[in-house]
Image (tube, rainbow, N blue to C red):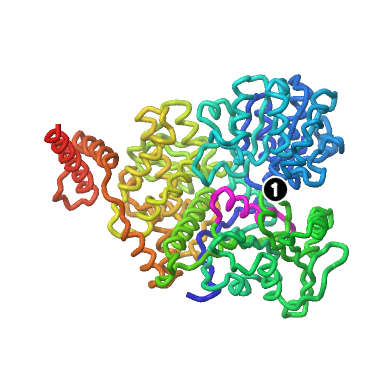
Amino acid sequence: MADDKIIPAVSFKAAHTGVSTKSDELGMRPMQAQVYEKRGEQYLLIKSPPASGKSRALMFVALDKLTNQGVRQAIICVPERSIGASFGSEPLSKYGFFADWVVAPQWNLCNTPGADDPKVAKSKVKAVGEFLASEEKVLVCTHATFRFAFDELGPEAFDNRLIAIDEFHHVSADAGNRLGAQLAQLIGRDKAHIVAMTGSYFRGDAIPVLAPEDEDRFEPVTYTYYQQLNGYEYLKTLDIGYSFYTGPYTEKISALLDPTVKTIVHIPSVNSKESTRTGKHREAEDIMNHLGDWQGVDPETGFHLIRAAGGKIIKVADLVDDDAAKRDRVVAALKSPKAREDRDFVDIIIALGMAKEGFDWIWCEHALTVGYRSSLTEIIQIIGRATRDAPGKTRARFTNLIAEPAADNPLVVDAINDYLKAIAASLLMEQVLAPRFDFTPKDAGPKPGFDYGDDGYQEGKLNVGVGPQGQMHFEIKGLKLPTSIEATRICREDLNEVIASFVQDKAVLERGMFDPEVVPEELTQLKMGKIIREKYPELNEADQEAVRQHAVAAMTLTQQAKAAISGDTADGELKASTAFVDGVRKFALSVTDLDIDLIDRVNPFSATYAVLAKAMDEKTLLQVQAVINAKKDKLTYDDARALAERALEFKRERGRLPSLTSQDAWERKMAEGVAFLQRHATKAASNG
């Protein structure tokens, strides 16, 4: 494996229509108009990628609530003060809206130095109380300030107010999450309006953002990455990949950093195993030394000036520096109009714990992150730094630089865990970048507005249609449809959340990627089925099975489409619209019908393994496989019960129980489950 090799997990080619950046007669982009249609909802959840315009969508909704719905005031809460700038005053009437968004300077509490420091945030409680007693309409503060104000003033203080929570994934249903508990109180009181906004609704700790009964109160508006990127005017391609290093990571940086590409480098925490132990400042200096010869510091911006190999002076913003005055000068420069207007204002940003969610540098073309981050949410947020649309910016990429597993490394298991997490993140991002699926049973008929190709919709044949909003219609023989409203919503809007739970399951990922003896149905039926039951216990068995089938179909078709077109495009490039459909059709060419049994019998991780096998050396793959197989899980009682339930379905369909001597691996597995339960029952009887 070459030292500078980047393994391409996915490369997404956008349709490049320019639609998502165009405004209507009210000055709203498509996502914002979609949100505004739901402005009458008391509880609104906006799930939309970075740069899609969530902050302005909130302004439109808030102004309508303040003007037409009798809401007294709006309070916007952001996780850190730098994000507060996104909610500053905007002349919306200039673009066709009925009012302007106005935030008086004294009521943007994020502008106070240190406002995201808990001690300073607590001192702002008095200001929140004064605002609530005034006739002013809009307040912007940090999550911390809101939490302290809520504790002191109580939930009743926010009656008939709009509470908007930006970066909503910071909320958790966990009892220890104060903001989550406070929101639950507001929902229980039912006298406030709440708008929740997030660029990713996934939590790395697998704890739900809201309790199911609270989440049911929210009206969701989902605008996908697929819709966003397809509608850009300039950005055409997004590459996501990862690269390995041995020794200090700073030595590998020189092979991955291109001084001509606008880049944000996120270095690892000083307490992480990726740290060089030389200190964060030394690491930042080493990265700059790899870029060229240091020439000094710009007195106005605080940027380091470095002469690169070609003679060009590149400007590096150091956000690692602990000197508050120096760092504040750099942050101020990055927030200035020049940073947005001038592509060459800065070239590279080095950060630790900053420049992630809400950070708006539209020229960023490469997000280079060292070390796996514990949350898939954080990775998606980092990727979002590079996916802003900007003139002349046609390609963006995210690279995760992680330690290579090595046989002689005592931390090999930890390295492999990080490696598996990186794969999970890339699989999830690939799913996020895929179209929204609309599955129906075979011969259910065409959907209005969908394009079924030159021959149109034909009964009895495999029909794949492309819809006007980036969704795709697939007909699947034997598919179960959801019957309840909630199951239908999950199948239409939340399949990516289901798939996130699936790929975050370490045992599932290990077996799917590196166990050559795995039976695909173990993953698609048993493991996915268990995840669905635990995630949606309120659904009946039929709806749980419908959600399972939809989720497995979405993940498998995404992977197989990539595999099918990998021979026609470099690195399995996942293109928009027709190429994706062509990939699915190519996958299904050998069968008359696309049926659920066929989908269940495909390992959804096989396509990703094929990409790895071509890009990595055999030694590394064998090492990973050996470590994983050494701790292979044995059959559990719960798994045996699930297998026995599948065996009963098998008996109803075929008139006999599965056989332990069958040539079919899945039939043998079901028979093993029945035998396990029989042995368990016999043992229990003898002990009784």
Residue 144 percent coordinates (x, y):
70, 38
Residue 530: x, y in percent?
36, 39
Q: Amino acid at mark 1?
A: Gly
Location of residue 13 (image quadrant): bottom right
Classed neighbour count for the residue bearing mark 1: other residues with Cα under 10 Å, few (<14), some (14–19), many (≥20): many
Q: Going by the picture, which residue comes out furthest to the front?
A: 119
Say whether residue 178 is left or right of residue 404.
right
161 in relation to 102, above or below: above
Q: What residue is shown at x 19% (from left), y 42% (from top)?
A: 676
Query: Is 188 inside the magenta-drawn segment?
Result: no
Residue 385 included in the magenta stretch of the image = yes
Q: Which type of secondary structure does the marked residue at label 1 adopt?
A: loop
Toward which corner of the image does residue 124 lie, by quadrant?
top right
Q: Residue at x 75, y 39 (%)?
A: 121
The image shows residue 75 at horizontal and vertical percentages of 75, 31
Q: Residue furthest left?
A: 686
**Res 24 visible:** no
Instruction: Pinpoint residue 550: horizontal percent, then vertical percent.
Output: 42, 40
- Front residue of this view, candidates 298 and 63: 298
Tell me the residue that label 1 is attached to. 358
Q: Nearer the viewer, residue 11 or 579?
A: 11
620 or 451: which is nearer to us?
620
Q: Is residue 80 above or below residue 544?
A: below
Q: Determine whether, in the image, residue 590 is placed left or right of residue 501.
A: left
Q: Which residues are magenta?
A: 373-392
